[in-house]
Amino acid sequence: MTEPNILLDALIEEAHLSHAGFAARINELGRRRGIALYYDHASVARWIRDHAIPRGDVPEIICEVITARLGRPVTLAAAGLDRSRGDRISDAPLPQVLDRAAAFWRSEARSATGSAERSAVVSGPAAIAPVFEWENPPDDLDVSSQRGHRIVTPADVVAVREARARYEEMYRRVGGIPVFPRVIGFLNGQVAPLLRESYDNATGQQLMRAAGGIVAIAGICLYDADRQAAAQRHFFDSLRLAKASGDRGFGGYVVALLANQAMCLGRYRQVIQCAETALRGARTRLSPALVTDLCTLQAKAYARMGERKECHVQMRRAEHMAGRIRRSDEPPETDYVQPGLAELQHAEALRQLGDLSPAQSYAEEALAVAGQCHLRSQVHRYATLALVLAARGETGASAGAALRMLDRARGMESRRIRDRVRDVTQAIRARGDSAAAREVAERARDQFAVPV
């Protein structure tokens, strides 16, 4: 199913035109040119809903109507009406990229399910293209803007940064499902207007960096809600903003988010490709915490493919880098790389390889420092230990870890956490119908509607 023409929809709203009024102006301009047009509100709705491009000179007439109404040039590409380019604007000028992102945020803010659910998750070369474009020239030499009447200030940028930190903390406490509407509302109501204002290059780079950070949080919330197509779209937008900011390290962080999503989708070669691209493309500007995370992602991907030697190589790289992490020197986005994360990921990798004894040791090491971590991280640590113990046939101990997992997951609204709870419950039940297994299953049903 085709994605709606969110660009045209946003422009019509910005022009303060109803669908019927817009159609009437198009018909009138057509008559002036000697073209008999009979469009109505239903025609406009179809152009938006089905991304239908009218025939002949009508797309140019549409742009002319909007240009006259807004007082600035509107191109076919800016209105989503360029037949030759379709929906791809990766090589478009930055202002056009920003307008498209803002139109997407507006569409998400207004829709209960979101427009991106009408399209599938991008795969194959198209999934790697945004990463390739981030890594390679041309760079944005000047991101200044003179489009608005107001000048963006450093205080505006700080407000966006603070919002990112606030929403990240909310996500960790309650999950992405309830937090996403707040994040997308902020993007639509606060960030999009700032991007349309005026700023010099230095302020513009800082604004792109801050905006990219909160777009990434929106993508994380959608990933957590299992809305993968929309999440991927936000990650792509965040990566483009990262390139505009000139911050290669931040771009590497966004590529790591794409690698993590690829892991969730079972695209293990893509995980490795993204991770290696981030390490190469950031040009030595990645922090130790981020390098640690990228190495553990690769280790898990190799484990899923049964490639033991490569898995262990990445585990050793991760352990070496983890010892160099200094939280005071890290960017705010890498705060998720908390004490014991490498051990937790190693336990998952070794569990996949069937090396259960060392997997248990790593899982217990991760739990030993869990008190220094946020609740969401604690949930995953207890889940991993429970899975390892269940695989070893230690049902009682596994159920005990699962119950502590459920204690910490109480109140979270997250499809990812729900899936984790389901996997743990099924692993324990597969070992027998003990009283402990039944207790875990009943708690999982009550908290997350996991079938017993």
Image (cartoon, grey):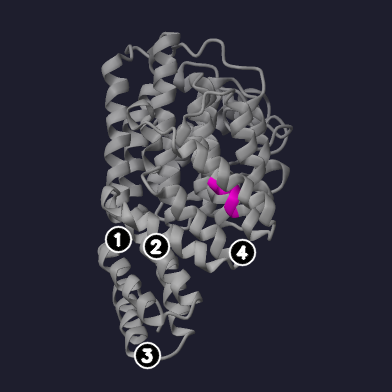
Secondary element under disc 4, as helix, strand or loop, is helix
Can residue 46 be seen here? The reply is no
Query: Would you say residue 341 sits in the magenta stretch?
Result: no
* Mark closer to the chain start, 3 or 2: 2
Q: Kindly identify which numbered label has been placed on residue 434.
A: 3
User: What is the C-alpha distance between the residues marked 3 and 1?
Assistant: 27 Å
User: What is the C-alpha distance between the residues marked 1 and 2?
Assistant: 8 Å
Q: Residue at x 41, y 36 (%)?
A: 334
Disc 1 vs disc 2: Cβ atoms closer than 8 Å? yes
Disc 3 vs disc 1: Cβ atoms closer than 8 Å? no
109 and 123: which is toward the camera: 123
Q: Residue at x 62, y 53 (%)?
A: 301
369 and 49: which is toward the camera: 369
Label 1: few (<14), some or many (≥20) within 10 Å? many
Tell which tag, 4 or 3, sits nearer the viewer: 4
Q: Dot 4 corresponds to which residue?
A: 353
Tell which tag, 2 or 4, sits nearer the viewer: 4
Q: Quadrant of the C terminus?
A: bottom left
- Range of residues picked out in magenta: 296-300
Q: Dot 2 corresponds to which residue?
A: 417
Disc 2 vs disc 4: Cβ atoms closer than 8 Å? no
In x, y percent, where is residue 91?
A: 65, 25
